[in-house]
Structures are given as structure tokens and as C-alpha cells.
Image: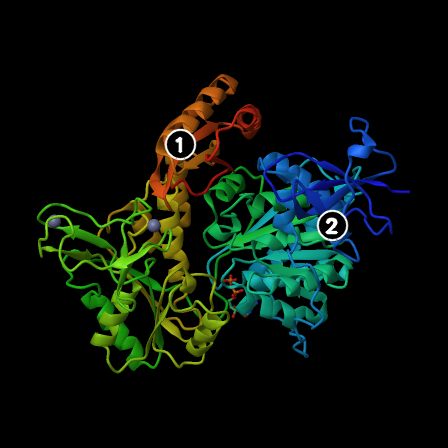
Amino acid sequence: MVSYLDIVFDIPLKQVYSYRSDEKGEAALGKRAMVPFGRREVMGYIVGEHEGPPPDLAPEKIKAIRRVVDKEPVFGAVNAALARWMADFYLCGPGEALAAMIPSARRVDSTPSFTDEGLLGEGHELSGEQEAALKGIAGMYAELEQHGARVNSAGQKSRDATQMAYLYGITGSGKTEVFLRAADLMLKAGKSVIYLVPEISLTHQTAGVIRKRFGGAAATLHSGMKNSERLTEWMKIRRGESRIVAGPRSAIFAPVQNLGLIIIDEEHDASYKSGNTPRYHARQIAMRRSRDEGALLLMGSATPSAEAWKLMTEGRIRRFTLSRRLSGGSLPSITPVSLARTEGCLSVELKDEIRKTALAGRQSILFLNRRGFSYFYHCRDCGYELTCKRCSVSLTYHKSLGKAVCHYCGYRSEAPSSCPECGSLEAGFTGFGTEFIEEELKHTFPDLRVRRADADTTGGRGSLEKLLDEFRGGEIDILLGTQMVAKGLNFPGVRLVGVVFADTGLHLPDFRAAERTFSLIVQVAGRAGRYFPDGKVIVQTLRPFDPAIKLACALDVEGFFEAELRQRAAANFPPYTRLIRFTVRSKDEAKADRAAARLAALVRPALPPDAELLGPAECPIGIQNGNYRRHILLRGPDMAPIHRAASLLLDAYGREKESAVYVEADVDPVNLL
Ligand code: ADP
Ligand code: ZN
Ligand code: ZN
């Protein structure tokens, strides 16, 4: 008879709470329950069951749960164990980890979320390189099955080392086909597959391909779905009805049975790292799951992350290279063009190529990683700069709104007609965003159909998909956009890709600035000439001699990483060290300073001699949404010792923490702003 339950909540505490079970006995491990918590009623996750009361509590003090939310459990032992590990590694509460995994809906949706496409796709005959890669991958899996696997206490297979493979291949080299074949092998062997793709390209392309290929066996989880739809898919996966799951970051938690393979497409993509607590990285979770559950981890990209590249050169990830484009295209020619003497933002070279492309009846993609019209307001007389009232960042002028907008907190103000400080008329916005380019394009090419894809034009559900469908259907001549047009999208008609301003990310105070710039240019360039041998890429820059830009234009991935890794090693940055970041925020500046100083003082004695403490310092974005932001950074050659220091720090700090100050931990941060 189960009468007592262990319950955790979506709060930043390690604490597991004891409750008395319900009378009907519906409560069970893996279900959610509404319970009294302080003066409120909140939802908790049942993570343990006991016959007797916990030894350290008087039974009459233990409250009963109010009611059970789920008819059948929504998570099992594997998720619970993973949540415990996540709570420990990412320095969060176990309930926060479960909340990040499980769709938050209370009820499953009774309407089926997808219809099958009918005829299942066949796939291509593999090229020699693809064949070799698939064989190698199958061989690795066979080895994994034969040796290594043993069974741990949760009934999972467990290995000492992770088996990892990487498909390193230029865009259009047929990585997807190899992923699908590898998945097919697994499904035929009775195993399950998790297939991760970056957030944006998801529903549209890969998920469609997967559903076409595997029909009813395929499930999709993504953020565009209603929570109830996600829960419906989730339960199908738990019951084993779906054995291949496609989705972005959070799909790594899919409760598949008998996991055989995890695929991470576009492994370098920043969307695999969560932007809020718990700040997990899907690749890290994938490594953990594949090890615990005896699965193979297969990643792929044309521009691997520096972390993955290092592991490949050390032989810890086995690399398979695809070097040729298979769809009739060839690699585009890439020309860097200096913007130094250009008036406006379209160089003569870029305008010529846009015209040529249109005359040939083909399409152009222009990429600029900055939305809005213009983003920097400056007075030439007194030096005044217009920044957000609540954040220490410049406001961006949005012409369509007629307002100056903060991209960090959403604050809006009127665009000043003269300098608010000295009244001078020699003041105004400079620097161009996508809205500005759109205007210049429409003005320069009145006969061409120009469309813009950024967060301002694709707000509604499905509107990006619609825009991309129109582009694919040839109804648009020039597609202009941010990140959204850079990711793994595949458009046969594209001849020209223009990077409007390649330098946008180079000046950020972040050691990954060069890597991001490099990989973005190579990825965007990969959208050109996939099916025809005449692809053309123009990269506009003010720094044509910057190594990241030069090497990207030469598509020299090896050359870039050789130089970049040498610099990272010299500067003691990842992948040669590991980082843990603590961010402090408070509306009260003195409190933020005090808390950051205390964190630093508490952690300093706990750090091993080969680790360092950087800070406390003001974050590069010193104020956000009215909160003063400070941070400290722990850095060391290995994770374990700095992680131990970080845990001790949180315990010590938690015992006497100040009110109205928030501390957030980020293990392996990718954003240092
Ligand atoms: P990647 O994922 O490496 O960027 P894709 O998988 O999108 O590349 O492949 C690019 C194109 O090549 C796709 O249109 C795909 O259908 C085609 N393709 C893949 N494998 C083959 C093959 N073996 N023979 C012919 N075409 C192929
Ligand atoms: Zn002024
Ligand atoms: Zn703001």
C-alpha cells in the first residue's frame, strides 16, 4: 500500500517534499498532482512512493495531496533519473528539470495532430561517401551492442564512454539522407530514434521529410504546437506507438523506449542551448542519455562547433566526411566586397548580381542579422546616445511603427526629432536593419518582388512557413531576412546569396564572436547554388581582412579551426577550459554589487589552484529591464572541480541570501552578455 509520496515542484530548490497519498490510491510515480503548498495550491511531480512516513517527520504534520492530474503517468524512471542528474549538473531544482522536459498541458488533445502523408518516400541511392559513412555508423552501433553495454540500477544499459559519430559535410552533401538511413536501420532493429533539428527549420522541412519517410511511426514535438498537442505526442511516444521523434532542443527528453540513436542535425546551432533555467544544452543531455541508455550519438554539420571539432581531432568523436554536393549543384563562388566606399547598404557588385539573377529567372536571398530600420541614435554636437530607459542598450528605430524600440525589453518611445539633450538637429539614427534594406531594395528594384522575414513580419503562427512556401513556389524574387533565412533551408531556385553586413557579430565582447561570424557566413553561403553549378555569394563587410571573414569566404573550415583553437588555447577559453557563470540581478544597484561581491568571496576559497575566478564585474548589458546585472565566471581546465565549488557556493549563498536579488547559474554558458 502506497501512502506517502515524494513530490518536487518547479522551483529553484533541491528539496523533495513529503505528502500523504489520495484515498482512491490514484497517485503514482510519474503522475502530477495538485497539492497544498504554503497557502497556495500548486502542481507537483510525484518522484517517489513509500508505504510508511519519512523517518524525520511526524505523520500528522504531513499534508495530503488534493487531487491527481494525470490518468496515466507522464514520466518514468528514465526521465526521473535524468532530471536528478540535470538538477545536479545544471545547478537547478529537480522539479525545474522535470518542468523543462514534460509538456505542461493538463490534458491530452483528442484530435490527432498530424495526418500521414500516405505514400512513404523511398530515398536516394547512396553515393560512395554516404555509403561509407552509413557503414561506419552501423559498425559503431554493432560494436556498442556487442561490448560495453551493461545494465544499471534503473534498468538502463550503461557504458563508460559515449559512442559518438559526426557527419561533417558541406551543405547539400546529403547528410540528411544518411541520417534517415541510419534511423531506418535502428527502427528495423526494433530501436527508437530521437532526431534533433534547430528550432526554425523544424516543422517545415526535416519533420515533413521524416513523416513522409516513416509515416505513423514518427512523432513531432515543437514549440509551435499547442501544449495539449505536445502532450498527446509525448504520450504516444511513451506508449511506444511512435519510435522516431523529431523536434528541437526539448525533444531530447522524449520518453522513447529502447533508445538506439540520437541524431543532432546542425550540431553547431545556438538554439540547442536553453536560454532560461535550467540552461541545458541538448548536446550535453544527448551525451548523457546515449551513455546511460546504450545509444549511439550521431551529429552533423557543415560548420561544427569548436567543442565538437576538438573532440574530432582528438578521435573521441569519429568523423565521417561528405565532400561533394549531390544534387547537381556545386559550391558557390564567394566574393567579399568592402562596404567602405558604398553609399547606402547595397554595393554595386551586389546590385549587379541581384539584377543578373532576376534576369535569369532565379531568386536571391539577402541576409542581415539585425531587424528594424536603423539602430544607433547619436548627436553629433553633444555626443548624446539614445538608449533604453530600462536597459543599457541602444534603441532601434522601427519605421513601420514610427517608434524607437528596445530589442531586449520591448520598451518603446517616440523617435526624437532633435537631440533630447541639447536640442541640436545634427542628431539622428544611423546603421541599417532589415527594414532599411527592404526599403532600399524596393526603391532600387521596383519591378522585383521583395519580402522580408524577421521577428517583426513573422509573428503569427505559421506565417514564416507561409512566406517560405511562397518563396519556394517562386512568388518572391528577393527574400530578405535575419537568422530565419540562414538555417538549413533548402530552396532549389536560389542563385544568389548576399550577406548584407557580415561584421554585425564581430564586435561583441564574447570569445565565440569569430566562430559565430564564420559559421553564419558559411551556412548562409550554403543556401546558394544547391541545384545548379552557378551559385554566387556576395559578402559585404567593412573588414575584408578579418580572418573569420576571409576564411569563411574561402570555405576553409579546417583553416579556421586551426587558428581559432590555437587562440582559444592561448586565451584559456573553451573548449580548452570549462566555464560556469553566475549572473546576479536586482533593481537595487547596491544590492546587485553586494551580492556579486559575496558570491566571489564565498567561491574563492573553494576553487582549486588551477581554476580562476573572473569578476565580479558588470555584465556587458549592465542593465536589463530595470535590473542591474553583475556576473562572476568560474573557469578551469576540468568541469568537476569548478562544479563542486559552484555547488558549495550555491548552498552557502542560499543560507543567507538577500531579498530582491536573483542569482542564476549557467553551466557551460554560450552567451556572456
Ligand atoms: P545536407 O543535409 O548535407 O545539407 P541534403 O541532405 O539536404 O544535404 O542533400 C542535398 C540534396 O541532395 C537533397 O536534395 C537530397 O535529396 C539530394 N541527395 C541526397 N543524397 C543523394 C544521393 N545519394 N543522390 C542524389 N541526390 C541526393
Ligand atoms: Zn545633442
Ligand atoms: Zn530595454
For the N terminus, the image quarter is top right
Q: Residues within 10 Å of mark 2 (few under 14, many from 20)?
A: many
Is 551 drawn above or below residue 5 in the view shown? Answer: below
Nearer to the camera, 60 or 629: 60
Residue 336 in view of the camera: no
Question: SS at mark 1?
Answer: helix
For the C terminus, the image quarter is top left
Residue position marked by numbered label 2 in the rendering: 33
Nearer to the camera, 146 or 39: 39
Q: Are marks 1 and 2 in contact (CB under 8 Å)?
A: no
Question: SS at mark 2?
Answer: strand
Residue position marked by numbered label 1 in the rendering: 592
Q: Residues within 10 Å of mark 1 (few under 14, many from 20)?
A: many
- Horizontally, residue 352 falls left or right of residue 613, namely left
How much space separates mark 1 and mark 2, taking CA atoms? 37 Å
Nearer to the camera, 557 or 46: 46
